[in-house]
């Protein structure tokens, strides 16, 4: 089996080549944007960010393989993006996945969810492991007087 250890949204991450330790920078809980929200059509906010997940073998002595699925859900429940990544724990006890975004697809203001799911390579059914929220707030642009 595979255990989901954690998932974090941040502006970037770096893996130290000597120690193989991971550093996370600017953990994101909220994004504030100047301007009016768009609710009818999806728009893209030009922001670079990463969704980083750590997976581990449930039993260190048993190699495992599976698939991670990351789904971006809008405040209204629409799926805006989805992607899958193989989890290979056949040689190592832990696996990190860094999903990089060069923009953030939005559809209005509110609470966006990065849903994390996984399944074993032999299964058909996905297992929901966590929802990571990211709040999007629009602030009215100030007009100069």
Image: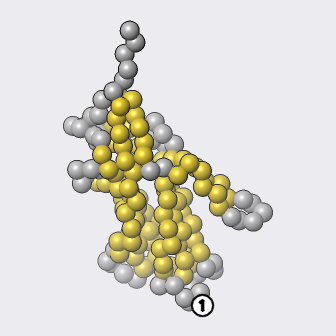
Which residue does the numbered mark 1 point to in the structure image? 61
Q: Residues within 10 Å of mark 1 (few under 14, many from 20)?
A: few
Above or below 113: residue 42: above
Which residue lies most toward the bottom here?
Answer: 61
The residue under the point 65% across, 61% down is: 22
Which residue lies most toward the right here?
Answer: 18
The residue under the point 41% across, 38% down is: 32
User: Residue 68: horizontal and vertical position, in percent?
Assistant: 44, 68
The residue under the point 64% across, 57% down is: 23
Please state the total of marks drawn on the protein image. Answer: 1
Query: Does residue 82 appear anywhere in the picture?
Result: no
Which residue lies most toward the top here?
Answer: 145
Above or below 67: residue 33: above
User: Residue 26: horizontal and vertical position, in percent?
Assistant: 56, 48
Give 104 or 140, whichever is nearer the viewer.
Answer: 140
Identify the image quadrant of residue 18.
bottom right
Above or below 37: residue 7: below
In screen coordinates, is 111 left or right of 104? left
Give 133 or 60, whichever is nearer the viewer.
Answer: 133
- SS at circle 1: loop
In screen coordinates, is 102 left or right of 110? right
User: Residue 83: horizontal and vertical position, in percent?
Assistant: 41, 59
The residue under the point 38% across, 9% down is: 145
Give 78 or 145, whichever is nearer the viewer.
Answer: 145
Q: What colouring does the structure picture have? A: secondary structure
In screen coordinates, is 86 left or right of 140? right
User: Residue 131: horizontal and vertical position, in percent?
Assistant: 37, 63
Query: Does residue 119 appear anywhere in the picture?
Result: yes
């Amino acid at each position: 089996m595979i255990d989901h250890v954690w998932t974090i949204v941040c502006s970037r991450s770096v893996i130290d080549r000597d120690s193989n330790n991971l550093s996370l920078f600017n953990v994101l809980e909220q994004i504030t944007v100047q301007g009016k929200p768009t609710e009818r059509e999806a728009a893209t906010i030009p922001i670079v960010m990463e969704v980083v997940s750590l997976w581990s073998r449930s039993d260190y002595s048993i190699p495992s393989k599976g698939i991670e699925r990351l789904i971006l859900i809008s405040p209204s429940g629409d799926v805006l993006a989805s992607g899958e990544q193989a989890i290979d724990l056949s040689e190592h006890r832990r696996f990190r996945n860094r999903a990089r975004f060069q923009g953030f697809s939005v559809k209005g203001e509110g609470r966006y969810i990065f849903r994390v799911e996984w399944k074993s390579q032999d299964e058909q059914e996905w297992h929901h492991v966590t929802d990571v929220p990211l709040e999007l707030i629009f602030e009215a642009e100030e007009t100069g007087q």
